[in-house]
Image (cartoon, rainbow, N blue to C red):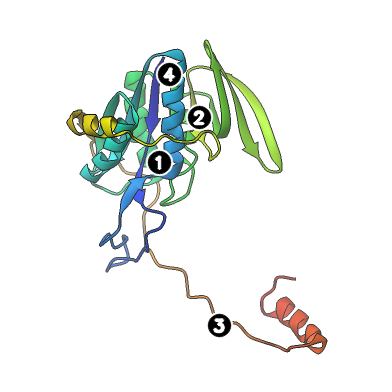
Amino acid sequence: MKLAVCINHVPDTAAKINIAAGGMNIDKTGVTYIISPYDEFAIEECLRLKEKNGGDVTVISLGGDTHKESLRKALAMGVDKAVLLKDENVRDSFAVARGLADYLKDISPDIVFFGKQSVDYDDGAVGVMVAEMLGLPSVSVVVKLDVTGGKAVAEREIEGGREILETTLPAVFTAQKGLNEPRYPSLKGIMAAKSKPIEERTLPAFSGKVTLVQMQKPPAKPAGRIVGTDASAVPELVRLLHEEAKVI
């Protein structure tokens, strides 16, 4: 079985993010980058499928040289091959999906996994767009997956519950938290990953569908207001919630 997992190299979720001068990017000074957490569930699921059914796992990331750090961590976890689709330019989700889809079309994997969303922009669009570009079925927000022969049964989260879907392979899946517990790289895996090659493909320039106009942080939360300390304040509180906050 040929398995592929697409990952992103993102700021640590604990990092304090500031906007760089010019308002077109974040200030990367002192920011630690990691594999997007949902992508770790995707890597782990591909490794488990390999252990159960045999085959190989290829990890792919689209971006600059810094993405190699996350690719090496994936190699340390146990994937067989790492590929960097190199483009130092910032791409929107459509342009990222196009680059990934073109490469995946060349290698024709049986299963392609993504995290349900990348925690930098949180749009959750790339995985399903890649499936559409490849003409493959897709199941998103997967919390359980069983693969037998050329079929897969996936359990996914929906509003207020879960649903179970069956699809034929090849197919695209996006991983939700709870699908598995990602393994930690072993010392042996970390040492081996340092010497494993990372295949590089330089991508041509590609125009996306969205143009970044400006980045800005949300406005500071206004100070609270005390309208009273006993039951007599209730009418005024209701009025403020209705007329100013507009939440009732």
Q: What element carries label 2?
A: strand
Q: What residue type is labelled 3?
A: Ala
- Residue 173, labelled with which disc? 2
Specify which label sits upstream in the sequence, 1 or 2.
1
Circles 4, 1 touching at the beta carbon (< 8 Å): no
Residue count near mark 4 (Cα–Cα under 10 Å), binned few <14, some 14–19, many ≥20? few
Residue count near mark 2 (Cα–Cα under 10 Å), binned few <14, some 14–19, many ≥20? many
Specify which label sits upstream in the sequence, 1 or 3.
1
Q: Which amino acid does label 4 sit on?
A: Glu
Circles 1, 2 touching at the beta carbon (< 8 Å): no
Residue annotated with mark 1: 94
Label 4 and label 1: CA atoms lie apart by 33 Å
Residue annotated with mark 4: 51
Residue 223, given in percent of the width and then of the height, sits at 55, 82
Q: Which amino acid does label 1 sit on?
A: Phe
- With respect to residue 31, does 136 lie above or below? above
Specify which label sits upstream in the sequence, 2 or 4.
4
Label count reads: 4
- With respect to residue 210, does 94 lie above or below? above
